[in-house]
Amino acid sequence: MRIDVFTLFPEAFTWFASQRHVANALAHGHELTCINYRDHTPLSAGQVDDTPFGGGAGMVLRVDVVEAALRARYGTDPVALGGRRRVIALEPGGRLLDDALVDELSAEPELTLLSGRYEGFDERIVEHFASDRVSIGRYVLAGGELAAMVLCDAVLRKLPGSLGHEQSAVEESFSAALEGGPEYPHYTRPADYRGWRVPEVLLSGHHARIAQWRLEQSRSRAADARRAPDAGGQARSDAGPERA
Ligand code: ADE
């Protein structure tokens, strides 16, 4: 997969690209390229944004600047791009990123992400150049960079070669293996810490019983999440993990 991220802060992605699963994906031939809008601005003062028509706080990313950056990268009128590749504008009000959307995006050969800044995009950017609007949650970040990293992280870790153990992304929260439910609890050594004992079944070495216990835990967490959706499944249930 080739991912292009358009941003005013390409240096923000240096740390991200060095993370193990991202580095693994890149070593396997996937590509992550940052393009700085500022490098392509047609404005002599290097301007990339402007004040909003009608007044209001903040600055808005200019449509001519984004067009110039997209043209420089793809050598075509960006209006025609939407039909050829997913061009995703990161916006708080967009389609919420969830596991189904991540699966959908990880099947694409190429993605273009547009990060906004300040008050966001001139609406004509999204209307004419983007195929999708995507949000990572109903809150407002100061810019789209963190949202772009979240999306890239979730997509790249689904690609072969990204995670060390190929099974890691198969049986995880929201996967078909767990019937779309949250993941079961994990434990490691020590088996007893301050009297908080690891559930005995996990120490039994009995694979079928462990698999059954994990599925039950996942189902129980899913039921909790349905009862208390705003609690993110944190509500306790009687069928929760054994506690000492
Ligand atoms: N840009 C600012 N806030 C955002 C959010 N919550 N999701 C995606 N892009 C954003």
Image (spheres, rainbow, N blue to C red):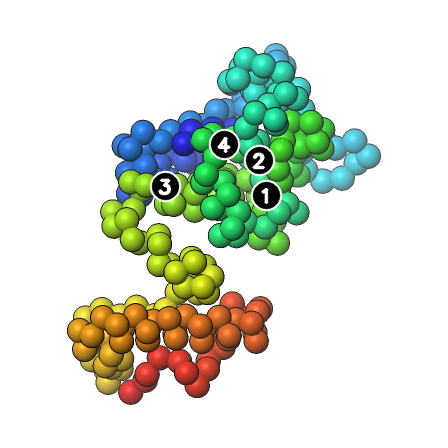
Tell me what residue is drawn at x 57 percent, y 35 percent: 88
Q: Is residue 187 visible?
A: yes
The residues tagged by marks 3 and 4 sit, at their Cα atoms, a distance apart of 14 Å
User: As drawn, is 173 to the left or to the right of 210?
Assistant: right
The part of the image, by quadrant, that contains residue 50 is top right
| Residue 163, percent from left and from top | 29, 46
User: As drawn, is 28 to the left or to the right of 12?
Assistant: left
Disc 4 to disc 2: CB gap under 8 Å = yes
In front: label 1 or label 4: 4
Residue to which mark 2 is pinned: 88
The residues tagged by marks 3 and 2 sit, at their Cα atoms, a distance apart of 19 Å
The residues tagged by marks 4 and 2 sit, at their Cα atoms, a distance apart of 8 Å
Residue to which mark 4 is pinned: 111
Question: Does label 3 point to a residue whose CB lies under 8 Å from ligand 1?
Answer: no
Disc on res. 159: 3
Question: Does label 1 point to a residue whose CB lies under 8 Å from ligand 1?
Answer: yes
